[in-house]
Amino acid sequence: MSDFMRKIPGGLLLVPMLLAALMNTFLPNLFTNLGGVSEALFTTSGLNYVIGAACFCSGAGIDIKRLAIVFKKQGLLLVVKTIICLVVGFFLRLVK
């Protein structure tokens, strides 16, 4: 299937999109009746689930040694931004 998709220009994007469109056209309620994780993954009601899964998968590939280097370089900036957010949030709460 991968070789077939590579022969078509843009096939890695277009072939799965076409298959999903055909499946949604002929079987529109296929994944809504399953419930749970599959419903959250394959319907529009589970957008937060998909975003969370994408963030988890991208975070799982982080090397801890590189993360320490990033915190050494950007740690102060992160702390300052957090303090500014807390001060502004506290001030806005007092104003209301």
Image: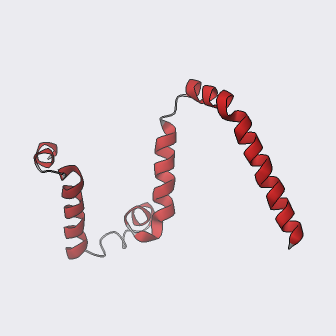
Q: Is residue 42 left or right of residue 56?
A: left
Residue 46 drawn above or below residue 64: below
Q: In the rendering, at what x and y percent does residue 56 appear?
A: 51, 46
Residue 40 drawn above or below residue 51: below
Label count reads 0
Colouring rule applied to residues: secondary structure
**Looking at the image, which residue is at 76% across and 54% down?**
85
Q: Nearer the viewer, residue 21 or 38?
A: 21
Q: In the rendering, at what x and y percent does residue 6 appear?
A: 15, 45
Q: Is residue 33 left or right of residue 22?
A: right
Q: In the rendering, at what x and y percent does residue 44 appear?
A: 42, 70
Q: Quadrant of residue 37?
A: bottom left
Which quadrant: the C terminus? bottom right
**Looking at the image, which residue is at 86% across and 62% down?**
91
Residue 74 drawn above or below residue 69: below
Q: In the rendering, at what x and y percent does residue 89 appear?
A: 80, 60
Q: Nearer the viewer, residue 48 or 93?
A: 93
Residue 95 drawn above or below residue 58: below
Q: Is residue 69 left or right of residue 79?
A: left
